[in-house]
Amino acid sequence: MLTIPALKEKARWVRRQILEMGLAAKSGHVTSSFSCTELLVALYHGGILRVNPQNPVWPERDIFLMSKGQSGIGLYPVLADMGFFPVADLKNFAGAGSHLGVHIGKDIPGSEIVSGSLGHGLGIACGWALADRMDFTNRLIVVLLGDGECYEGSVWEAALFAGHHRLNNIVAIIDRNQMGVLDFTECSLQLNPLDEKFRAFGWDVQTIDGHSFEAIFAAFQDVRSRRNAKPLMIIANTVKGKGVSFMENARFWHYRVPEGDQIEAARKELAQG
């Protein structure tokens, strides 16, 4: 497992890859991926997830479901750096013949589902978790959702199911960057109090700083030996566009990449960390 300083540097590297991939393709949800970078780096490079890049379908692996599939551009550098596929593949993101699309597909080593059509990841996690319980399989089912995704009714149906069946092998993370496509979530359709809502649905809930590796690791401490029978929801407070000041918490950057003078400005900020 990498040290905290090494993980921070890895997160900076991932953001630089995200930017360059987006620039080359003139596509991709860059800001949505910046907000969950530390979460993904902690899960993989921080050793939270039990995976085997040489055998992506290893039966004893933990299951990670990227429900906010628009952030595939953020997961791809992490998977490539872990050795699931060559880092060189990142250069052809969303290009002709590339297996790395704007939304996550099933043909990507390390990817368990097709996502991008929002609201399905938590339901799939419930099915996987219930099947694992029946098979006496001891592994984690970890699913990452966006907060705008929580407007989907299917998320709440799945949350109710998980709470009722006490699926404590599920850990769900909400990338709570407070923004949807065009506006802040609390202006579009209020989600708060998000923590109280999930508690009412039978979940154990923690709220953390989603850019702090220390906070992320604390949330996952002893996760494999939890005595709490409830599924665990981690609400990770983040900043959309984290790392590039003019993109942070700025509306209308949901599906844009920098252009003109913005390109070098973004590169400079990410190089400095």
Image (cartoon, grey):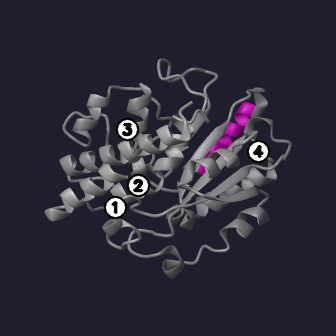
Q: Which residue is drawn at 74% across and 28% down?
A: 138
Q: Is residue 45 left or right of residue 83?
A: right
Residue on which the image places disc 4: 167
Which residue position holds label 3? 77
Q: Nearer the viewer, mark 1 or mark 3?
A: 1
Q: How crowded is mark 4: few (under 14 residues within 10 Å), some or many (20 or more)?
A: many
* Disc sitting over residue 159 in the figure: none
In the displayed structure, 31 sits above or below 93; it is: below
Q: What residue type is labelled 4?
A: Leu
Which residue bears the numbered disc 1? Answer: 244
Main secondary structure type of the part rendered in magenta: helix
Q: Which mark is residue 34?
A: 2
Say if residue 147 shows up in the picture.
yes
Q: Earlier in the sequence, mark 4 or mark 3?
A: 3
Estimate the spatial distance between the alpha carbons at disc 4 and disc 2, rounded to whole Å: 30 Å
Q: Which amino acid does label 3 sit on?
A: Pro
Residue drawn 77% across and 44% down?
168
Disc 1 and disc 3: Cα gap in Å? 18 Å
Determine the CA span between mark 3 and mark 2: 12 Å
Label whose residue precedes the other's in the sequence (4 or 1): 4
Q: Is residue 125 one of those drawn in magenta?
A: yes
